[in-house]
Image (cartoon, rainbow, N blue to C red):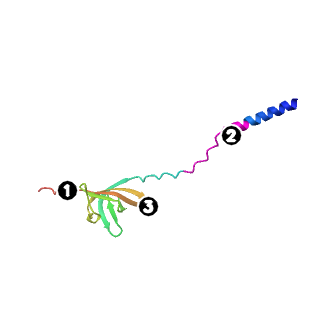
Amino acid sequence: MKKMILLVTLLTLVAFASGVMAQQKPAPAPAPAAPAKEEKPKIEKFTGVVEKIDEMAKAVVVKDKKGEKTFAVDDKTKITKGGKDMPFAELKKGTNVSVEYKKDGEKLVAVAIKAAAPKAAPKK
């Protein structure tokens, strides 16, 4: 009789445990690694005077008191003078400019070049 009670108790316990396990949600599979967010390149500014323009390489060299930097110019570079768009070909040596650029590895890519509007000639 004791064996029968023990057997019924054991079968009841097994049935209850399997019922509970069947109701549990399976552990979620690990989510695939999300692609790392690309950090937006930091936009920096450099102000100086146009020292050299290389139309073939689409680059402009700008010099300030501390030194000079060469900026690559591409189709996305916005060039303005006095608030109006200006073609790259009209950028001249000696023009005061403010360049907003981002680093692409070792390369400095101009995002925007703002040429200073010509100052009025001093009156004599």
In front of the other: label 1 or label 2?
A: 2
Where in the figure is residue 16, as x and y percent of width and height? 73, 34
Circle on res. 22 = 2
The foreground one among 120 and 38 is 38
- How many marks overall? 3
Q: Left or right: 106 with respect to 3? A: left
Pointer 3 or 2: first along the chain = 2
Residue type indicated by callout 3: Glu
Residue type indicated by callout 2: Ala
Q: Is residue 91 above or below residue 25?
A: below
The residue range painted magenta reads 17-33
**Mark 1: which secondary structure?**
loop
Circle on res. 119 = 1
Q: Residues within 10 Å of mark 2 (few under 14, many from 20)?
A: few
Q: Does residue 25 appear in this view? A: yes
**Mark 3: which secondary structure?**
loop
Residue 120: say if magenta. Answer: no
**Residue linked to disc 3:** 106
Residue type indicated by callout 1: Lys
Task: Give the quadrant of the C terminus.
Answer: bottom left
- Please name the residue shown 17% across and 56% down the image: 120
Residue 27: say if magenta. Answer: yes
